[in-house]
Image (cartoon, rainbow, N blue to C red):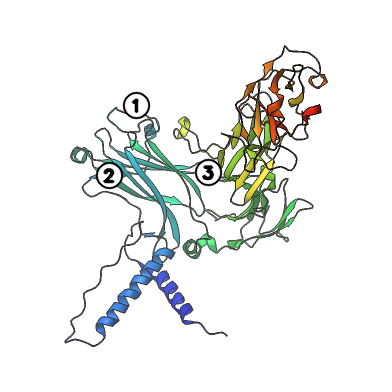
Amino acid sequence: MGSVSPGEQTHLRLSLLCLGWSRGLPGKQPSRAPREPAPHPHPAVPGPQPGAGMLAGRAVLFLSLTWTTCRGLAMPRVTECGVSCSPGFACRSRVNRNIFNSFCRQAPRSLSPSVLEALTLSTAMKCAPHDDCSLVLHVQASLTLHEGLRGLEACSMNVDTQETRCQSVRVSRASRRLQVGRQLQVHFDCFEVGVAQSLYVTLRTVPHFCGIQLDRQYHVEDCGDQDVGRNLPGCSAKKFSYRVDRDRKVVLVQAPEAPGGSDYYVRLCLKWFTCEDVGAPARVTANRLSRTVSLPYSRELPCLCLEGWSATPDAVRMQACPFEDDTEALWDAVHYHPGAQALSWEPACPVSGHVSLCWRPGPGALCHHLEHSGRAAKGRVSTQQVGWGGRGHGPDLSAPQVQYPRVDTQPQLCLKFSTSRGFWVRCPFKGQRFQAWKMTVQPAASQGHLRVTFFSPEAAHFQVYLCQQRKMWPPACRPALWATALPPASGDFMAGPAVAFVDVPRDKACVPNTCIQGRRTDMLFSAPQQLCDLRCPASQGTAD
């Protein structure tokens, strides 16, 4: 058996000390970082003792380092529920909710929309002597007291079950008169929560004034947190194991023995703000001989996860995401809407990154950014919420991630996705049945000119630029020449009918390293086409 190094011994002692300290603190502790304990008075010692000061200094240093380490490892503890206010305010709390505060009223002109100053959320642990521990949500709020305000209300909604709990604090009338204009801080400690829960927390004034509200999304720590995993009884449950059969498109899950001989459930779900069902959960009964279940899937998505839990009240749900590195399917979720001429990207999983439109001058060329097309991708969950109950709604999961209106269906037009893992390019109009406009260059009837002609399946407006190629992108393009629209013609547009043309001077277009670039101007987003290094003595070309 190997020896333990001095450093490992120190870490072990610190861990044991933190465990004993966090479980044995007397009285109610604040949800903020614990304060330093007051030093005990030194006992009377007759006469100076050599080295006592040095030993005391080392002891104080050791306790300080240990306390700092414990603060980093342990979650704040509370022994009982409570609501507290700033000193000088006379407050009383209510746990039951007044439904009439769901309906907002018009705010007085003297009330600033920023009267609610802060909303801070954290998790604390409540451990009763000789009993299991549980988790509570600590809510810290502050506002500037106004003569029209009577207090604060904080509500926490479990996103999985839609269960809502509210607590309110009222300031007495006499205290309100004395404290108008001062900052009121309130601490709520009585929101019981579960491991790995997703919450939606709202802070309002009492009475509730329209437009004055703070909202936060919050995820409670899971069993992976060191303190939670060590002290919450549900985290001691065994985890399931699994194997992916990609050929059959199934996940084989081995369910563990549930505590107390209870049944066990396992399911596939899409993990957004919550984990949304993908099919019905599979039930493994306690007396079942085989504890392996087969869960089919259709697509390998990074947010397609497994979730397992025992059939006991308040059981902790274990999660695993077998395809978290398979991101290719996300970039193919591009859709074109012909009626609105809109291009949208609607991924099946939340993605953080950047999206933009770009265009490729030719096969294998770099995809160049289109101006004003950059969009941030932050996931489809919307935190806009106008109220609770019948007047409001929860997070919106229906809106597309990114949408571009009035997009030209050019094969050269592409989308570029950039994340922390890299970038990907998709060209939705390449090789499909979309009809795109064409540009040709031929000698004009007038001497010394070239005619640029545009063909399009619909009426359109175009501009022409003369661009000088250079080492750095983009090329230097001269002021635009407007194309002259032609009368509409019937028949196949590729058979001959043109929609617009413009004549450009031959001596300017035939300069080496010069390109004729055509752009459609009646669309918000369109990829240009260009012809470069024309052979002017017998010039004739077509841009595809």
One can see residue 535 in this view: yes
Amino acid type at image mark 1 = Gln
Question: What residue is disc 3 on?
Answer: 161
Question: Which residue lies at the image location 47% right of the left edge and 32% below the top edge?
Answer: 392
**Residue neighbourhood size for the residue with mark 3, other residues' Cα within 10 Å, grouped as few (<14), some (14–19), many (≥20):** few
Q: Which residue is mark 1?
A: 106
> What amino acid is found at the position of numbered circle 2 in the picture?
Leu
Q: Is residue 117 above or below residue 537?
A: below
Label 2 packing within 10 angstroms: few (<14), some (14-19), many (20+)? many
Question: Between marks 3 and 1, how big is the CA–CA gap?
Answer: 31 Å
Image quarter of the C terminus: top right
Quarter the N terminus occupies? bottom right
Residue visible at 72% across and 25% down in the picture: 506
Q: Nearer the viewer, residue 117 or 537?
A: 537
Q: Residue furthest top?
A: 487
CA–CA distance between discs 1 and 2?
22 Å
* Front in this rendered view, residue 181 or 291: 181
Instruction: Residue 154: name its quadrant.
Output: top left
- Position of residue 61 measured from the top left corner of the image (x, y, whole percent): 33, 74
Residue holding disc 2: 184
* Residue 508 % position (x, y): 68, 28
Q: Residue furthest right?
A: 495
Q: Is residue 455 above or below residue 525?
A: above
What is the tally of numbered marks visible in this picture? 3
Residue visible at 47% across and 31% down?
A: 390
The percent position of residue 393, horizontal first and vertical second, equals: 50, 34
Query: In the drawing, what numbered circle is on residue 54?
Result: none
Q: Earlier in the sequence, mark 2 or mark 3?
A: 3
Q: CA distance from mark 2 to mark 3?
A: 32 Å
